[in-house]
Image (cartoon, rainbow, N blue to C red):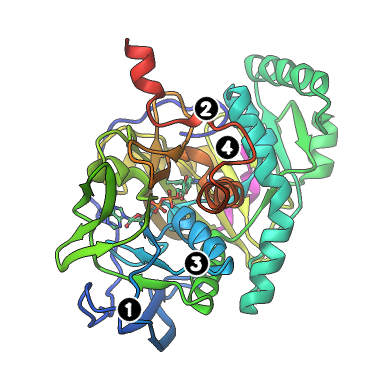
């Protein structure tokens, strides 16, 4: 589970995740003259699906999209919105419905400081912090563009130790963070209880990260797709990209079951599936299961991280308990063992949740690379860009990813050095 040191659970279960019953765009993938945007989401309410926005949109027949984005998760939609706002004609091609995979399954933490407990590398730390700094504007703009409340909360996160070994790890982390000048407070057992009543009496010490935030990632996805549609981004849903089509050293478009969709720039944001379109995108899925508890009034005031789980309080009384880390391929089952482990860990760190109602469970696939860094930048063709492999932090990393990829498309170069994130770094280490 993903607390501050995640063991791998390796037991796929048999409970399937409910899939959204979609309304399918009746357009042929080749016919851009009348694209019908049908944006469907399961949002933060118990409904599984909701028709949000449907509009007929006249496109200029004479032009293919300039930019084809493969995959309508948070990364694809953030990039599409940014480029469309710069006047580019963008099409998102999505095998299912936008925002229904990892970006929907996530817990919504924007917690770069808590993430440092995972011993992440310097380039990732810098990327997380840069994206975190962009978040207030990202959320404000999206809320203004769409009129939606994204439930962006700046309540900070607590990291809690319940035994000597964990306390020693937190002490080491504290030294590291203070040395790096990061905002962190050390808390005694008493201070922990004052900060968060209802914690386990075993909680003996903790750290508080005041600048860690969280967001309702489903509301965020919903807003992003609406914002994209307002910028005339077209969505081809239920349309898998089968392959890239290359000619004369360039990608000329992407193959779909309905034919070739041409584009001047192709951006692969297919998350855990990016490698099925382009083998040089070395990502693999890491399953995360989540359990949702419900309690009124919301008993938790902060994100809470402990050794075997994290707890994310949403303003509506839900507590997201996450998450397993499992290398089980493209299997999104929810298992008895996974949920049992999450529930036991949650009750053991926060007994105040004992009377909470059990809500939904779900699982998603994090796009993981072997060095835990995303893949960002040009791929093996000059007009082909990759933005995938965001692993545990894709919600947090969306604004900086959109900014950097838009810079490559618009200016030819990104404003920060993307060398640590290049797609072919893995072959270097093999040679
Ligand atoms: C349980 C869990 C908890 C998480 N919690 C957090 C968190 O708290 N904070 C955080 O920052 N991150 C979190 N993450 C990580 C985050 O969810 C991911 O890093 C992020 O969603 C990746 O976004 P994406 O757009 O790359 O991928 P996705 O959201 O998976 O989107 C990829 C899209 O591409 C589409 N696609 C795939 N193949 C094709 C194809 N051939 N043709 C067309 N479309 C295709 C898919 O259908 C999908 O919609 C969590 C992840 C999980 C699973």
Mark 2, residue position: 419
Residue 325 to residue 51: above or below: above
Residue 386, given in percent of the width and then of the height, sits at: 41, 43
Name of the residue lying farthest toward the front: 248
Q: Nearer the viewer, residue 279 or 43?
A: 279
Number of the front mark, 4 or 2: 2
Residue 253, given in percent of the width and then of the height, sits at: 26, 57
Q: Nearer the viewer, residue 202 or 28?
A: 28
Q: For mark 3, give the secondary structure.
A: loop
Disc 3 versus disc 2: distance between alpha carbons?
26 Å
Q: Nearer the viewer, residue 63 or 34?
A: 63
Q: Residue at x 53, y 25 (%)?
A: 5
Q: Which sits earlier in the primary sequence, circle 3 or circle 2?
A: 3
Judge: label 1 CB < 8 Å from ligand 1: no
Give the number of the disc on residue 348.
Answer: 4
Q: Magenta stretch containing residue 352, yes or no?
A: yes
Magenta residues, as a range? Answer: 349-357
**Left or right: residue 180 compared with residue 384:** right
Disc 1 versus disc 4: distance between alpha carbons?
62 Å
């Amino acid at each position: 589970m993903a607390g501050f040191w995640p063991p791998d659970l390796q037991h796929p279960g048999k409970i399937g995740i409910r899939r959204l019953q979609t309304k399918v765009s009746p357009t042929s993938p080749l016919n851009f003259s009348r694209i019908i945007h049908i944006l469907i989401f399961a949002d933060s309410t118990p409904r599984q699906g909701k028709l949000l926005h449907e509009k007929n949109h006249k496109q200029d027949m004479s032009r293919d999209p300039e930019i084809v984005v493969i995959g309508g998760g948070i990364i694809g939609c953030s990039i599409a919105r940014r480029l469309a706002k710069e006047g580019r004609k963008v099409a998102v091609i999505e095998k299912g419905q936008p925002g229904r995979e990892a970006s929907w399954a996530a817990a919504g933490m924007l917690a770069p400081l808590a993430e440092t407990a995972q011993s992440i590398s310097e380039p990732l730390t810098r990327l997380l912090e840069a994206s975190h700094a962009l978040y207030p504007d990202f959320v404000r703009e999206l809320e203004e563009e769409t009129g939606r409340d994204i439930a962006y909360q700046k309540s900070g996160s607590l990291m809690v130790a319940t035994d000597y070994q964990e306390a020693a790890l937190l002490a080491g982390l504290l030294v590291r963070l203070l040395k790096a000048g990061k905002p962190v407070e050390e808390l005694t057992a008493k201070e922990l209880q004052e900060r968060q009543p209802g914690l386990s009496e075993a909680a003996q010490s903790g750290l508080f990260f005041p600048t860690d935030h969280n967001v309702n990632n489903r509301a965020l996805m919903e807003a992003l797709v609406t914002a994209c549609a307002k910028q005339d981004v077209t969505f081809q849903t239920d349309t898998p990209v089968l392959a890239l089509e290359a000619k004369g050293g360039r990608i000329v478009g992407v193959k779909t079951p309905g034919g070739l969709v041409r584009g001047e720039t192709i951006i692969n944001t297919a998350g855990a599936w990016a490698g099925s379109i382009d083998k040089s995108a070395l990502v693999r899925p890491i399953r995360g299961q989540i359990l949702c508890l419900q309690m009124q009034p919301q008993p938790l005031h902060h994100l809470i991280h402990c050794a075997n789980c994290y707890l994310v309080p949403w303003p509506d009384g839900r507590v997201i308990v996450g998450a397993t880390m499992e290398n089980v391929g493209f299997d999104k089952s929810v298992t008895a063992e996974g949920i049992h482990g999450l529930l036991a860990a949650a009750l053991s760190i926060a007994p105040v949740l004992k009377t909470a109602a059990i809500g939904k469970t779900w699982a998603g696939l994090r796009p993981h690379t072997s060095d835990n860094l995303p893949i960002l930048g040009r791929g093996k063709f000059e007009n082909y860009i990759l933005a995938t492999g965001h692993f545990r932090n894709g919600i947090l990393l969306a604004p900086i990813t959109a900014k950097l990829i838009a810079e490559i498309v618009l200016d030819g170069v990104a404003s920060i050095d993307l060398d640590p994130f290049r797609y072919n770094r893995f072959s270097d280490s093999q040679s």
